[in-house]
Image (cartoon, rainbow, N blue to C red):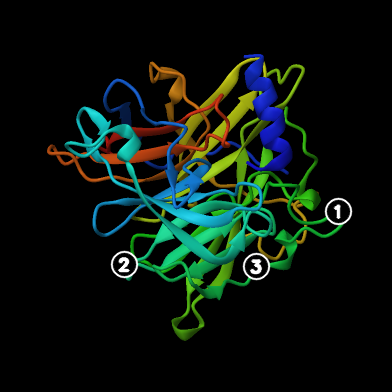
C-alpha cells in the first residue's frame, strides 16, 4: 500500500467476468498456526538511517536468512531488509541471544530506485543470490544483483500498463511475485481487476490476471500465459474505507499456487485468507484485451486457512514464503505484515505449519 491508501488506512485504524463452479481437484492440506502468535519487530528500529517498516514481501535466502522488500517511504531510497530469525514448533523467535529489535540485521539499497519511482510489493531470491522484485505502481518486475544493482527489467504486457481507461488501477498492480521450484517460471498478478476487465465493485468477485513469465535461455524471463483468478467479494463493506485484493502468490511443486487474499474494512479491520489454486483446465486469456463479455474458465480456489482462527489479531499480512521444514517433515510458511510506517500498526512475522493430507 502507498500514499492515499496509507493515509485512509491510518485514519480508519484510529477509529478502530463469467465463471462456473468446478470440482475440487487437489487434496486439502491441514494448516495451523505455529506458536501462540506473531513475532513483532519494534516500530522504532532503524538500519542505515532509515526505519524498518513497510515490509511488503519476504523470501528465504540460501543461507537461511530472509529478505523483505520495503514498499516505499516518501522519497527515501528503495531498499531490501535482511532478517534473521528461527522457525520451530514454537513459532518464530529471534536467534539465540537476540531481541526482536535485532531481527533486522542489514539493509540493501536498490540502485536508482526510491519511493517516487518504486513501490516494492514482491521479491524472489534466486539460487545465485540475484533478486527479482515487483513494483505495483507502473507495474514492473526487475532483476537485481545481490548488491541491489539493476541487471534487467522484464517486459510487461501492455494491457497491464496504466493508460487512460486501461491497465491497472491506482496502486493495484503487481502485488505478488513467486518463482516455481524448478526455477523455470515466475508468477505475478495485479491486485484487483484491470480497468478494462471489470468494474471495481467490491461486492462482486474481482477478476485479476495471473501472469506467468517463462525463462527462455539468454532472453531471460518473457511473458507467457495469463489465467483469471477471482478475488473474493467483500461482505457488507459498510461506510468508510474498504479494499480486498490478491496480496501474494507462492508456487508449489506440481504447478499449483498458494494465494493470499487481504481485506480491510474500516469497521472490522483486517481479514486474511489463504487459498490453494489449481490451474488445471483454466483458460489462457493472454489474447483477450478485455475480459468483459468473454467466456473463459478461471482457476479453481480452495480455502486452506482463515486467520480468524489464529487466536490473535492479524495486521496487514501481505508477504509469504516457505520456511524450513519441521522435524516431522511438515512444511512451514512464513508471513510478514506491512505496517505502512504507521505507529498504529505492527510489523508481524508469523509462521504456519502445512501438512498435505492424503489424496
CA–CA distance in space, label 2 to label 1: 40 Å
In the image, residue 227 sits, relative to residue 304, either above or below, namely below
Image quadrant occupied by the N terminus: top right
| Disc 1 residue crowd, few under 14, some 14–19, many 20+, Cα 10 Å | few
* Total numbered circles: 3
Q: Position of residue 89 (x, y in %)?
A: 19, 30
In the rendered structure, the answer to whether residue 234 lies left or right of residue 49 reads right
CA–CA distance in space, label 2 to label 3: 24 Å
Q: Earlier in the sequence, mark 2 or mark 3?
A: 2
User: Can I make out residue 27 in this image?
Assistant: no
| Disc 2 residue crowd, few under 14, some 14–19, many 20+, Cα 10 Å | few
Which residue carries the number 2 mark? 127
Tell me the SS state at disc 1: loop
Whether tag 2 and tag 3 are in contact, CB under 8 A, the answer is no
Which residue carries the number 1 mark? 165
Q: Earlier in the sequence, mark 1 or mark 3?
A: 3
Q: Earlier in the sequence, mark 2 or mark 1?
A: 2
Tell me the SS state at disc 2: loop
Circle number at residue 156: 3
In the rendered structure, the answer to whether residue 54 lies left or right of residue 333 reads right
In the image, residue 324 sits, relative to residue 15, either above or below, namely below
Tell me the SS state at disc 3: loop
User: Can I make out residue 12 in this image?
Assistant: yes
Front label number (2 vs 1): 2
The residue sitting at 51% across, 82% down in the picture is 219
In the image, residue 355 sits, relative to residue 270, either above or below, namely below
In the image, residue 4 sits, relative to residue 16, either above or below, namely below
User: Within the image, what quadrant is residue 264 found in?
Assistant: top right
Front label number (2 vs 3): 2
Q: Position of residue 7 (x, y in %)?
A: 70, 32
Amino acid at each position: 500500500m502507498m500514499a492515499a491508501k496509507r493515509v485512509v488506512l491510518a485514519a480508519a485504524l484510529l477509529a478502530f467476468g463469467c465463471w462456473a463452479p468446478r470440482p475440487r481437484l487437489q487434496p486439502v492440506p491441514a494448516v495451523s498456526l505455529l506458536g501462540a502468535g506473531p513475532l513483532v519487530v519494534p516500530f522504532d528500529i532503524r538500519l542505515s538511517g532509515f526505519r524498518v517498516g513497510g515490509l511488503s514481501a519476504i523470501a528465504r535466502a540460501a543461507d537461511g536468512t530472509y529478505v523483505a522488500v520495503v514498499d516505499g517511504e516518501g522519497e527515501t531510497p528503495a531498499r531490501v531488509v535482511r532478517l534473521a530469525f528461527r522457525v520451530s514448533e514454537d513459532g518464530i523467535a529471534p536467534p539465540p541471544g537476540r531481541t526482536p529489535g535485532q531481527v533486522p540485521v542489514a539493509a540493501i539499497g536498490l540502485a536508482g530506485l526510491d519511493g517516487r519511482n518504486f513501490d516494492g510489493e514482491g521479491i524472489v531470491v534466486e539460487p545465485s543470490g540475484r533478486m527479482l522484485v515487483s513494483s505495483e505502481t507502473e507495474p514492473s518486475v526487475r532483476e537485481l544483483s545481490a548488491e541491489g544493482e539493476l541487471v534487467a527489467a522484464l517486459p510487461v504486457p501492455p494491457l497491464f500498463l496504466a493508460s487512460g481507461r486501461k491497465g491497472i488501477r491506482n496502486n493495484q498492480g503487481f502485488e505478488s511475485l513467486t518463482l516455481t521450484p524448478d526455477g523455470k517460471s515466475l508468477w505475478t498478478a495485479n491486485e484487483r481487476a484491470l480497468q478494462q476487465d471489470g468494474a471495481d465493485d467490491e461486492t462482486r468477485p474481482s477478476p485479476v490476471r495471473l501472469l506467468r513469465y517463462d525463462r527462455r535461455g539468454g532472453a531471460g524471463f518473457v511473458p507467457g500465459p495469463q489465467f483469471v483468478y477471482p478475488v473474493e467479494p467483500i461482505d457488507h463493506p459498510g461506510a468508510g474505507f474498504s479494499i480486498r485484493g490478491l496480496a501474494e502468490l507462492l508456487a508449489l511443486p506440481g504447478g499449483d499456487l498458494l494465494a493470499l487474499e487481504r481485506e480491510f474494512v474500516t469497521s472490522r479491520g483486517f481479514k486474511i485468507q489463504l487459498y490453494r489454486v489449481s490451474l488445471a483446465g483454466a483458460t489462457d486469456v493472454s489474447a483477450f484485451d478485455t475480459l468483459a463479455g468473454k467466456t473463459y474458465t478461471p482457476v479453481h480456489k480452495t480455502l486452506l486457512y482463515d486467520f480468524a482462527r489464529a487466536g490473535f489479531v492479524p495486521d496487514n499480512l501481505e508477504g509469504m514464503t516457505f520456511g524450513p521444514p519441521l522435524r516431522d517433515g511438515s512444511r512451514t510458511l512464513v508471513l510478514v505484515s506491512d505496517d505502512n510506517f504507521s505507529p498504529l500498526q505492527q510489523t508481524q512475522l508469523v509462521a504456519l505449519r502445512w501438512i498435505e493430507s492424503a489424496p
